Image (spheres, rainbow, N blue to C red):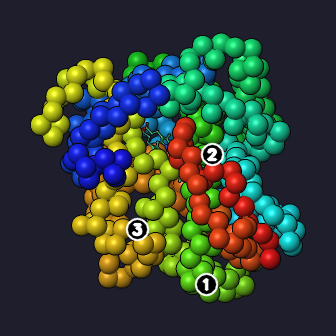
Amino acid sequence: MLRAYSQYGPIFRVRALHLEYTIIAGLEANKFLAREGDRYLTVKKVYSGVATGLQSNNFILNHDGKKHRELRGILRRGYSKTAVIPSVPLIIRLTQEMARDWKKGERVFVVPALKRLITKQLGQVLLQYDPEGYFEDLQKFFTTTAETTVSNQLPEFVLKLPSFRHTQTRVFGLIDKVMAARAATPPDPARRTLIDDVLAAVDDQGQPYPPDLLRAAIIGTYIAGIDTVALTCSFAVYALLKHPNVWERVVAEVRPIFQRTSNPTMEDLKEMKVLHAALLENFRYYPVGPGAPRTAAEDFEFGGYRIAKGSNVLVGTGVTHFQPQFFPDPFTFDIDRYLEPRHEQRQPNIFVPFTVGEHTCLGAGMAEIQVMATIAALVNELDLTLDPPNYEVRYKTAPSRGPKHDLAVRVQ
Ligand code: HEM
């Protein structure tokens, strides 16, 4: 996108697989998404495969306008920073358990290990249930549904095939397990959870929502959270090890804090300014969602061109992350950008790892904390090296952007 942007400007067309996309990118495109995205762009076609897999008419990413705002209102608190802060010690403990399982001299593939960890964290933190035994099912459910209409790698009929039906039945069975566990332990009235909010929700007629809202919320948590958080953490492991000076600065900050307290909380995480800066740079340099896929809801103009209703549009939100007028020397991994006095992240519509506009990530606050706590615990537990030491990251782009599965570390 960057290369095409510098060649053709803020609007251009590409062919990918059998489809044509109009890409709009740069600051003006991000502003357009933020201010006019709800009017001119729709998510309906793009995320419909996921909604079909969920058999739900209440999947948040499949709605625009009023209905979307209603669903966002229901899920907001459950995914908020406030909801996750009390679970920081739990996130750290689960990460420590994983790290203590990695033996000295062992070679570990980072992406699958972190995907498993994040699946466990999301289940225990947000749904109060450990999805042990469902990891493969959740992965398959996510990739198959996302690869139909989000990245258009698969035809939609795969959602009707017996192999997907089997996965779907397994994943829906997880919902029964979550609800049975909840029934067995009476909810703590002092701590409302995502599920409490979903069960209590009523529509604009005052009627309770059908059960497909619960299905979309429970499975949607994994769909929205596993790859995004795990791939961000995987990039972070790579970036820290690739820049030994950054790794050393982070170690020098994090380890004394863990020595002081065996059970760090959010207050301790807040002291980790260097780690925070390193993770912001990781969000800039390695965005896992560098584009917002949409369909034109009506004809509109952008950059002097007319885009017809029904066109596939990709807003290349991440292009601004690499423009030198916003981030000097953009291809240098420089964590001091986010420290006094620079604070380059404070540029609206420019630093956008969670995109902008109506569909801005609802879990952004929670995700930042989850990534911080996970990487802090990992850095504290282990000395690692890339394996091989001169490894250069290779990317996969769909359905979410991340390092390829050959990213490996050696436990020292
Ligand atoms: C580093 C981690 C994460 C990144 C980079 C990320 C990124 C994004 C992006 C780019 C979108 C917008 C998609 C679009 O416009 O097409 C999005 C939406 C969303 N994210 Fe995240 N996400 C992360 C973690 C999470 C987590 C942990 C949750 C909750 C468990 C979550 C919940 C959501 C929800 C519910 C939406 C849909 C919002 C809406 O349609 O209004 N995300 N995320």
**Label 3 secondary element:** loop
Between 171 and 234, the residue placed more toward the observer is 234
Question: Which residue carries the number 3 mark?
Answer: 331
Quarter assignment of residue 102: bottom right
**Which class describes the residues within 10 Å of circle 1: few (<14), some (14-19), or many (20+)?**
some
Alpha-carbon neighbours of circle 2 within 10 Å: few (<14), some, or many (≥20)?
Answer: many
Marks 1 and 3, Cα distance to the nearest angstrom?
A: 21 Å
Q: For residue 69, what is the image quadrant?
A: top left
Which numbered dot is residue 226?
2
Give the x, y percent position of residue 224.
56, 41
| Label located before the other in sequence (3 or 2) | 2
Count every numbered label the image shows and give the total: 3
Name the quadrant containing residue 262. Answer: bottom right
Res. 248 mark: 1
Of pointers 2 and 1, the one earlier in the residue sequence: 2
Marks 1, 3: nearer the viewer? 3
Residue type at the position of mark 1 = Glu
Question: Residue placed at 57% from the left, 23% from the top?
Answer: 154
